[in-house]
Image (cartoon, rainbow, N blue to C red):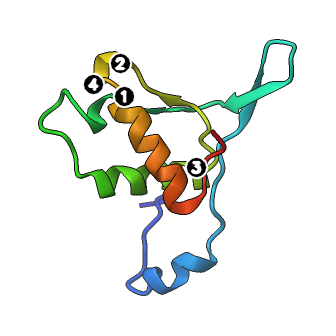
Amino acid sequence: MSGSWRRSSSSRSNMASLPVPTVPHVQLGSQGLEVSAQGLGCMDMSVFYGPPKAEEDMIHLICHAVELGITFFDTADAYGLFNNEILLGKASLSNNVLAL
């Protein structure tokens, strides 16, 4: 198929040399605060849509999102009292990736 992208069998060894895409940021208001144009919704990390996900997997997901430039994380008490905020804190401590 023309225009499609396929990985070669040796693509895993070449993955480290590929550029990592980053999410653009937008300015909020006039105070200079910037946030990623795309966010990560945290609702299904702790409740809804089935049982809670493995904490280690969710911390890895958060760290990966930060590496891609995500700085907006959608959390709420309705998703479980402080569950997602605790995950964000653990991700911050695990790889020193978030500035809280």
How dense is the environment of label 1, judged by Cα within 10 Å: few (below 14), some, or many (20 and up)? some
Where disc 2 sits, the SS reads helix
**Where is residue 19 shown, x and y percent of the image?**
66, 66
Q: Which residue is mark 3?
A: 66
Kindly identify the residue that appears in the image at 40 percent across and 52 percent down: 59
Query: What's the distance in space between the residues labelled 4 and 2, CA to CA?
Result: 5 Å
Question: Which amino acid, mark 2?
Answer: Asp
Q: Do the numbered discs 4 and 2 sit on residues whose CB atoms are within 8 Å?
A: yes
Where disc 4 sits, the SS reads loop
Q: Which residue is mark 1?
A: 82
Position of the N terminus, as image quadrant, is bottom left
Q: Is residue 96 above or below residue 86?
A: below
Query: What's the distance in space between the residues labelled 1 and 3, CA to CA?
Result: 20 Å
Is residue 70 visible to us here?
Answer: yes
Compared across the picture, whether 99 is left or right of 92 comes to: right
Q: Do the numbered discs 2 and 1 sit on residues whose CB atoms are within 8 Å?
A: yes
Q: Is residue 74 above or below residue 31?
A: below
Q: Residue furthest left?
A: 50
**Where is residue 69 shown, x and y percent of the image?**
64, 47
Depth check: give the residue in front, 92 or 60: 92
Question: Which comes before the other along the chain, label 2 or label 1?
Answer: 2
Q: Do the numbered discs 1 and 4 sit on residues whose CB atoms are within 8 Å?
A: yes
Position of the C terminus, as image quadrant, is top right
